[in-house]
Image (cartoon, rainbow, N blue to C red):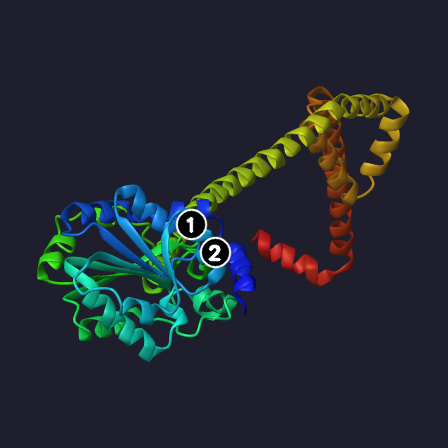
Amino acid sequence: MDHNEYFRFENKFRGSKENVLNRLEQYRKLVELIFIKSRYATSLDIGCGRGEWLGFCKSIGFKSLGIENNEIMVKECRKAGFDVKEGDALDLIKNIPSDSLSLVTAFHVIEHLTFNYLKELLSECNRVLATGGILLLETPSIDNISVSTKLFYTDPTHINPINPDSFIYFLNNVGFDASKYFYINGGPLQESNPAYLTRLLNGIAQDICIIATKDLSATELYFSNNSNWSDRLNLGISTIEGSLEFDAAINKKDMVMREKIIENQVEIFTLEQKLLILEKRILTVETLNNQLNQIQLWKKIIRKIPLIYRVLKKIKRILSFATMKILLIKFFSDTRLGFLLFRIMIRFLRKIQLISCAEKYQNIYIQLRKSYNSDNKVKCDNYLEKHYYLNPQAKSIYNDLRS
């Protein structure tokens, strides 16, 4: 990729100068502290690009020097009044005197370099830094899944994904006293719900800030607990931190779901109890309804009583007729069955409260019964007398009984 093409590529994918300057503001406290505590107010920016960091350091008070191998970007920086040297970084830094700089920086540069080249460059950075000096590096974070699998390869000149742990090891090997890295510049979904999986894909820190101290005095100053410059960093979360938060959120969500399930079960139990009570009430209402229906039936029957009474009155009138009496007397006086029916009729009349009529027929029944009995007695006596005279043996038995 030629210099013109890469300059256009940088403008499109790195963002505008204003956006870059906004991201660099997180280092203001650190740079101000370095400016106050350093022996030399001189800084070097390796791969200075369009010069955003040079202008940032100059605004604080540093004498800023830049190194850039893209001639288009060098022209842009020089137009802005910055001191920039064009050429290879390793070759140019070797010309800088030892212990002459308070701050050396490289933003999104080390991922473009081979390992051996980078190792030698780091050694030169340690050499040119003065006592109390700081090395500040920024590079894409391969801990971010989207960065390591896609965004890192957007720039075809990226050749060296940086592992921060091994990088710290190599910094210590080339002579730095202490090194530390920070996950910064969280993705767009960093503040979204931890229970969303998309937060792990597009909310994890996209870059890593690596800081190395020249000597023990710088280590105690910049890495002590009292130093608060890191509070201004746009800190992000790592993938493991995001995963732990995801698990915690899911577990919390599960607990909430379990609590809701328990609440629902309690509500279901309560509703079941209410349903049982309602069923009992429905049964009671049905029972009352049945009783009411029976009452209604009896009411209907009671309403029919006047009709029954009128019918019975007509029967009474019919029975009071002389001709009917004669027929009844004739029928009932001829047979024993007739007397039985006569008695049943009298009882029926009493049951239906026709007392006077029943007593009247009771008297008739008694008279008929007497008449029937006397007639039967006469018939029986005649029958016995007839056999008495016809049977000598009967006479003999009769005389013996009398004696």
User: Can you tell which mark lies on residue 402?
Assistant: none
Q: Which residue is mark 1?
A: 20
Residue 192 shows in the view = no
Question: Which residue is the extreme one toward the right?
Answer: 323
Residue at 16% over, 45% down = 36
| Foreground of the two, 23 or 234 | 23
Residue at 9% over, 61% down = 216
If you read the primary sequence from the N terminus, does the residue marked by circle 2 or circle 1 appear first?
2
Question: Which residue is the extreme one toward the bottom?
Answer: 116
Instruction: Give how far across and how far down residue 329 sits, in percent.
Output: 83, 32
| Foreground of the two, 331 or 91 | 91
Q: Is residue 16 above or below residue 305?
A: below
Look at the numbered discs 2 and 1 and tell me whether their residues touch, using CB distance below 8 Å. yes
Instruction: Give how far across and how far down residue 297 sits, in percent.
Output: 69, 31
Q: Which of the 4 quarters of the picture holds residue 390? A: bottom right
**Which image quarter is the N terminus in?**
bottom right
Helix, strand or loop under label 2: loop
User: Does residue 147 appear left or right of residue 241 in this picture?
Assistant: right
User: Does residue 362 appear left or right of residue 186 in this picture?
Assistant: right
Residue at 70% over, 23% down = 359
Residue at 10% over, 56% down = 220
How would you rate the neighbour count of disc 1 (Cα within 10 Å): few for under 14, some for 14-19, many for 20 or more?
few
Q: Which of the 4 quarters of the picture holds residue 293? A: top right
User: Does residue 208 appear left or right of residue 193 in this picture?
Assistant: left
User: Does residue 335 appear left or right of residue 143 in this picture?
Assistant: right
Instruction: Give how far across and how far down residue 17 sits, in percent.
Output: 46, 48
Residue type at mark 1 is: Val
Q: Which residue is mark 2?
A: 14
